[in-house]
Image (tube, helix red, strand yellow):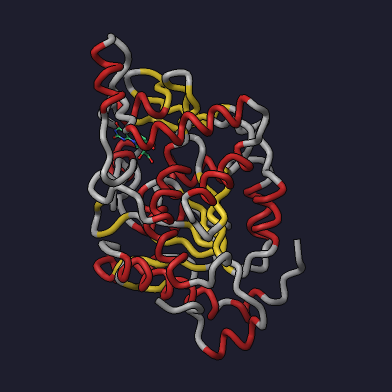
Amino acid sequence: MTSNPFSAEHRCALRHTPQVVALAGGVGGAKLAAGLQAVLPPGALTVVVNTGDDFEHWGLTICPDLDTVIYNLAGVNNPELGWGRADESFAVLKTVGLLGGEDWFRLGDKDLAVHLRRSEWLRQGSSLTEVTDRLRRALGVPSTVLPMSDLPVRTLVHTDEGDLPFQHYFVGRRCEPCVLDVSFVGAAEATLTDAVYTALAQADVVVFCPSNPYLSLDPILSVGEMRSLLPSLRAPKIAVAPIVGGQALKGPAAKMMREMGYPVSPVTIAAHFDGLLDGFVLDKIDAAAAAHVRMPALVADTLMHDLPSKAQLAATVLEFAATLWPVLASRPAP
Ligand code: FO1
């Protein structure tokens, strides 16, 4: 892997270690984050993570997307499931089930240790930002991982069967109910942390990872002044389409798009983030759609099946972003 993915020309233009911020949800976001970490110098990447999926379970605070990102960046993730840890056991889950407890959400034993420690630290008064930093350091992750807010924001899925808290829709009901809309409870009160604000203000590139736009990236955009801050940044903001060849890379994004009446196309994703992006990356299978994206678009191989392909996509996205630096350089600092 390279330690600086930018071309000599762009390295000279920058004159400092590049700072990259990635906005990410769970599986798809974590994959590209791992690729970005692989091609950037240590400490150059900050991942701002969706916490709309968080919930209280077994009396513990569970933060699935934060954990998925940390496990991927630490290389201890379960690549088959996309969530949880590799070489996991489920003895506690099985025993809780035998004792009549809730076992629909599959918490593994090693994973459970993370929830225990996080909940303990939160009870002692640490912020989610501080706790997340302790966890990523303990797992040897060189990148900064930040929750989108320290205040609770909870994704609520409005379906034809009523309103469902995110994990009840996603895991409990396996995304079966028809989605009418999505809202983020607590978003109006939530604020950006100093850490998120500073990372964005200092960023040279902001990447919208190929995460579900409605369930993973919209919660991040719902926090505080995020939507007004992004357009004021000098850093190019580049999204990678999570829809490839009419299908979602993972999860219910394509099904939700059909249910909400949108064409299942990367063009819909680009339009969804209209006004927030400076560039858009879509897969080569969707090359014909690039002409319908109303911003600079790059066609690339976006499938990430191993670390080299994650790193290759990361390098491609960063080099594309660097081509936009001269265009955006005249913007005033936020
Ligand atoms: N997803 C599932 O589909 N089933 C599970 O039982 C499950 C357990 C689980 C435990 C810890 C964790 O960090 C994630 C877990 N996930 C599970 C994924 C979770 O629902 C995520 O919120 C989604 O992957 C969306 O990003």
Of residue 143 and residue 186, the one placed in the foreground of this image is 143
Residue at the image position 43 percent from the left and 21 percent from the top? 57
Say if residue 255 shows up in the picture.
yes
The vertical placement of 39 against 101, above or below, is: below
Say how many tags the image has: 0
The vertical placement of 310 against 71, above or below, is: below
Residue at the image position 56 percent from the left and 43 percent from the top? 132
Say if residue 269 shows up in the picture.
no
Q: In which of the image's four quarters is ligand 1 placed?
A: top left
Which part of the image, by quadrant, shows the C terminus? bottom right
In terms of image quadrants, where is residue 171?
A: top left
The vertical placement of 157 against 2, above or below, is: above
Which part of the image, by quadrant, shows the N terminus? bottom left
Report the side of 197 relative to 46 (left or right).
right
Residue at the image position 48 percent from the left and 24 percent from the top? 60
**x and y percentages locating residue 222 in the rendered image:** 58, 40
Residue furthest to the top in view is 100
Report the side of 42 relative to 35 (left or right).
right
**x and y percentages locating residue 308 in the rendered image:** 31, 71
In terms of image quadrants, where is residue 169?
A: top left
**x and y percentages locating residue 325 in the rendered image:** 61, 77
The vertical placement of 57 against 272, above or below, is: above
**x and y percentages locating residue 211 in the rendered image:** 40, 50
Of residue 313 and residue 234, the one placed in the foreground of this image is 313
